Image (spheres, helix red, strand yellow):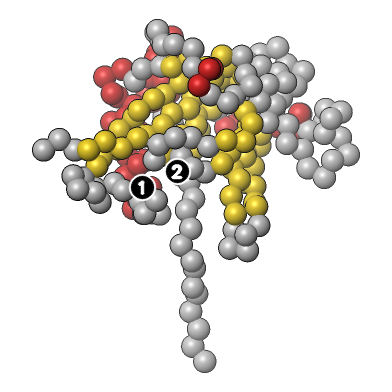
Amino acid sequence: MKTKWVHPHNYGWLQGQLDENEVDHLWDCIKTARGKNMKGTLVGQIDRSYRIEDKDNWFWKNVIERLTSGYGKYFDHDHVPINSMDPPTQPYLESMWVNYQSAGEYQPIHNHAGAYSFAIWLKEPVEFEDQAKINNAKGASKSFNNSFQFQYTNIFGQIKTHLYSLGKKWENTIVFFPSPLMHTVSPFFECDEQRVSISGNVFLKHKKK
């Protein structure tokens, strides 16, 4: 008997580590930001979220555009009509913002608008392992303090969670994913410093003839 593996198509996400130039560019965008407070348009139960501008479209050209193309090569773009409409469409960086999260604050489960989205952890003030020792997590089968989670259904219709145990080692990491993918950020505790992260959305527009 001959057999073969049959792996049904499913979507995932890309994960990468930003280099020094890429990180410096983002901090520069944050420091010189004149953007509006986006808290009223977002679900985050956090201190502040400010829109930032990608200077000279540099981060799009050097990072996000490559990730968009790379996602299509690995998973395909079936869930979004990139280059498949008449007139054809092309992706662009529609928005990017910085989040300041204090102890006890969180991002409830949500998804984003657009075709693709991303999250970048720039400053992680606490360690997942230490947060697991706090009283609210003691005795639980698993700690979720100071974590980022993707939620999705598998082939059996079961809801699954992929958890990122956040801490210093995850600083300057980017995760790039389809915008409909549900995700959440759990709170951390007993720390006076803030977590600093960046989020953004990739939209589609019609190509100019």
Q: Mark 2 or mark 1: name the one nearer the start of the chain.
A: 1
In the image, residue 169 sits, relative to residue 33, either above or below, namely: below
Element type at marker 1? Answer: loop
Residue 116 % position (x, y) = 41, 39
In terms of secondary structure, where does tag 2 sit? strand
Q: Which residue is mark 2?
A: 178
Q: Is residue 109 visible?
A: yes
| Among the 4 quarters of the image, the one containing residue 19 | top left
Q: Which residue has dot 1 on it?
A: 80
Is any atom of residue 17 visible in this view?
A: no
Q: Image quarter for residue 32?
A: top left
Q: Give the residue at x 45% y 21%.
A: 97
- Image coordinates for residue 8, horizontal then vertical, percent: 49, 66
Compared to 195, does 147 lie above or below? below
Q: Residue at left 40%, top 36%?
A: 114
Image coordinates of residue 175 in percent, x first then y, are 49, 38
* Dot 1 crowding, Cα within 10 Å, few <14, some 14–19, many 20+: some
Marks 2/1 in contact by CB < 8 Å: the verdict is yes
Residue that appears at 56% across and 14% down: 48
Residue drawn 62% across the image and 36% down it: 109
Q: Quadrant of residue 169?
A: top right
Q: What is the x, y in percent for residue 62?
A: 31, 31
Q: Is 153 on the left-hand or right-hand side of 119?
A: right
Q: Is residue 24 above or below residue 63?
A: above
